[in-house]
Amino acid sequence: MANIRLLDKRRKSIRNIRKITRTMELIATARFKKAMDRAAAATDYTQRITQIVRDLANSVSEIRHPLLQARPETRNVVMLVLTSNRGLCGGYNSSVLRVLLAKRADLVPATNKIELHVCGKRGINGLKFKNLSVDKSYTQFEDKPAFADVAVIANELMERFIAGEIDRVDIAYTRFLSSSKQEAVVETLLPLAGLDTPTQTTVSADDKKAADYEFLPSAESILEEVVPASFRVKLFKCFLDAAVSEQIARMVAMKGATENAGEMIGQLSMTYNRARQARITREIMEIIGGVEALEG
Amino acid sequence: MSSLQCIVVSPERTEMDVTAESIVLPMYDGEFGILQGHSPVIGRLGYGCLKIRKSGQNEERYFVDAGFVQVANNVVSLLTDRLVPVSQLSQEEATRELEVANRMPSKNSEARAAKEKAVSRARAQLRLLGAGK
């Protein structure tokens, strides 16, 4: 029972850790709220662009755009991976990497070359550990991705896709479904899987009414601009989703850590108290024993 | 009393939601004025100046970074990448942008188109700055 001091030291250090995890949880909560607000603010643009596409679809017989056309064979693929720069967020990064590697294994036999573009230090390190070469890495995205930064990536991918250098762009990220459910997914960004055009059944009376729009300069020319814009905003939404999910993951992980630390402190306190009591008892016994020996 | 709702959204947030008397939009090929009761229009925006006149007030001027506009039922919605009040544009930045744009390669038609876009974007900013003085 010489480890009473050790037990006490350990308890103190766990208390300190609990303080840190508790603070991180609070910070993650605050950041999550901010990220959530940003994501909510961004939906307005998405809705309006969908609205424009719908109105356009009513007056253009067929939507054609190079970004929408699937290639007969996919030879060169770019996989974009969105991970976080910082750790301590539970299984957030590892689940993104897991789905990415599974998808990559599927793609390898049919393709010529797979480029990995990775955002976030955790993903870069994770792939390095797996001995995969990262073709391009970005670490400038924190919890507030700026549209201007995302647009640069989007434009580059679009240019290369149109030029025929790449035939497909996939993205692995954590999709935000609700504040209690996020899942790591791989989605195909290019070719765009069709714009969110309404199916025949949803074209209601008020859409018909809206069909008499005047187009400046022409519906086709507007469409030419709308498709890249909606690609950019789609990519931006992925970044926002990833940022929100990261904060949630960190919040949950840190909440768990704080709870565990509390539990551990309780256990250690109990062991410590027992050890202390045992020592006191032993000392009393020794004193009594000594007294008895003297008397005897 | 004529009124026209003007909503400007960027991918990041809703930049502006105001009621105005008249709005002048920078279209891809020139300016386009809108008053109350305009017929429905969907159009492409260029780089230029958005002018909003509220009743009894001076005209407000903003730089618009391309995008789209939709006019319906006295609601003018602009979708643009960036909206900056003219007073916040910076001369140095715009000049630098123009220099960068002028140095862009123009090997093939795509690069040429990108260059033209960048040049006209920078020129539009400079034009607005010049007009503001």
Image (spheres, coloured by chain):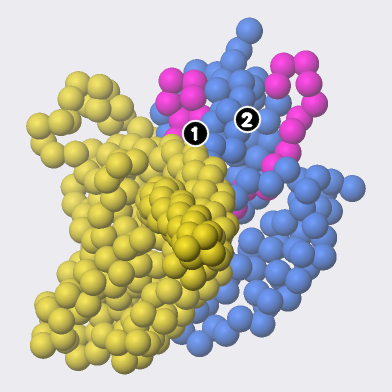
Chain colours: A yellow, B blue
Image-quadrant location for residue B36: top right
Chain part drawn in magenta: B54-81
Q: Main secondary structure of the magenta part?
A: strand
Identify the residue shown where x is 43% and y is 20%.
Answer: B73
Rendering coords of residue B130 (x, y %)? 84, 53
Q: Nearer the viewer, residue B110 or B12?
A: B12
- The residue where tag 1 is placed is B77
Q: Is residue A78 above or below residue A294?
A: below
Q: Is residue A172 above or below residue B32?
A: below
- Inspect the image, locate mark 2, and give the three-letter code of the amino acid beneath it: Ile
Rendering coords of residue A24 (x, y %)? 53, 53
Identify the residue shown where x is 49% and y is 70%.
Answer: A2
Label 1 is found on which chain of the structure?
B
Q: Give left or right: position of A131 versus A229.
A: left
User: Alpha carbon of mark 2 to alpha carbon of mark 1: how far?
Assistant: 11 Å
Q: Nearer the viewer, residue A35 or A19?
A: A19
Mark 1 lies on a secondary structure that is strand
Q: Using the rendered image of the protein, determine whether residue A189 is visible from the camera's viewpoint.
A: no
Q: Nearer the viewer, residue B3 or B90?
A: B90
Image-quadrant location for residue A209: top left
- Inspect the image, locate mark 1, and give the three-letter code of the amino acid beneath it: Ser
Marks 2 & 1, CB-CB < 8 Å contact: no
Q: Using the rendered image of the protein, determine whether residue B75 is visible from the camera's viewpoint.
A: yes
How dense is the environment of label 2, judged by Cα within 10 Å: few (below 14), some, or many (20 and up)?
many
The answer to which of marks 2 and 1 sits earlier in the sequence is 2
* Residue B71 lies within the magenta run: yes
Residue A98, label in figure? none
Q: Nearer the viewer, residue A24 or A37?
A: A24
Residue B23, label in figure? 2
Tell which tag, 2 or 1, sits nearer the viewer.
Answer: 1
Image-quadrant location for residue A140: bottom right
